[in-house]
Amino acid sequence: MKIGLFFGSFNPIHIGHLIIGNAMAENTDLDEVWYVVSPQNPFKKNKSLLHEFDRLEMVERAISDNFKLKATDIEFKLSRPSYTIDTLTVLAEKYPRHEFVLIMGEDNLVQFSNWKNHDKILEYYSLYVYPRPNTPDHDFKAHPKVHFYNSPLLDISATFIRQCIKERKSIRYMVSEPVEKYIELKGFYLQ
């Protein structure tokens, strides 16, 4: 199987994440898209980051009705911060019959040369990139392992959602209903 890996904090997972994952699963040659819940992104220091098991639970609830989308906790067992190259190595060993590709926004592609072993990632893996408006020029546009796919984009952020919750405003339609109910049940992001 050909698997697209969509890495993120998903703090919380929102409709924008779901649209991108579904668009990649439906409009590319991918068999499945796996949401890789990252315990700690090396580029982000976030004090409002929920425990990884709570974020995994929200991802699982958000995608439970789509057989092409899966959630994985593979990075929970790795050293922290987690680096994509290490995760890819573990996945390749664990699932030798699968072909893995990375899904990312073009805004992340601009910073890709800062990633640990980015050259090795491009040597062994393809990148499926969804364009983002106002992305500056970068060196990866013509790379043979970088493929661009259109996806509907929403200007929505987890930061905005967390701020709405803190201010006790509705997050309806920004997250799926199961995620909204879980956040309410647990009282997440109120502080």
Image: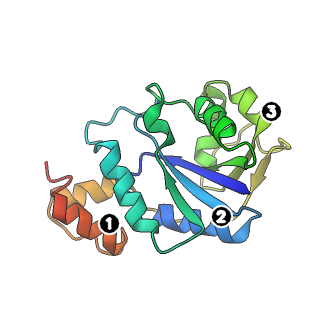
Give the position of the N terminus as an image quadrant: bottom right
Label 1, label 3: how many angstroms apart (C-alpha)?
37 Å
Q: Residue at point 49% right, 30% down?
A: 82
Question: Quarter-wise, where is residue 93 in the image?
Answer: top right
Residue that carries the numbered disc 2 in the rendered image: 24
Residue 182 seen in the current view: yes
**Residue 111 makes an appearance in the image:** no
Is 147 placed above or below 92 here? below
> x, y percentage for residue 119?
74, 27
Mark sitting earlier along the chain (2/1)? 2
Q: Earlier in the sequence, mark 2 or mark 3?
A: 2
Q: Is residue 126 left or right of residue 79?
A: right
* Residue at disc 3, secondary structure: helix
- Residue sitting at 77 percent across and 52 percent down? 147
What residue type is disc 1 on? Val
Q: Which mark is residue 179?
A: 1
Closer to the camera in the image, 11 or 168: 11
Provide residue 36's location: percent of width, then percent of height.
51, 47
Query: Residue 123, labelled with which disc?
Result: 3
> Which amino acid does the dot numbered 2 rest on?
Met
Q: Earlier in the sequence, mark 1 or mark 3?
A: 3
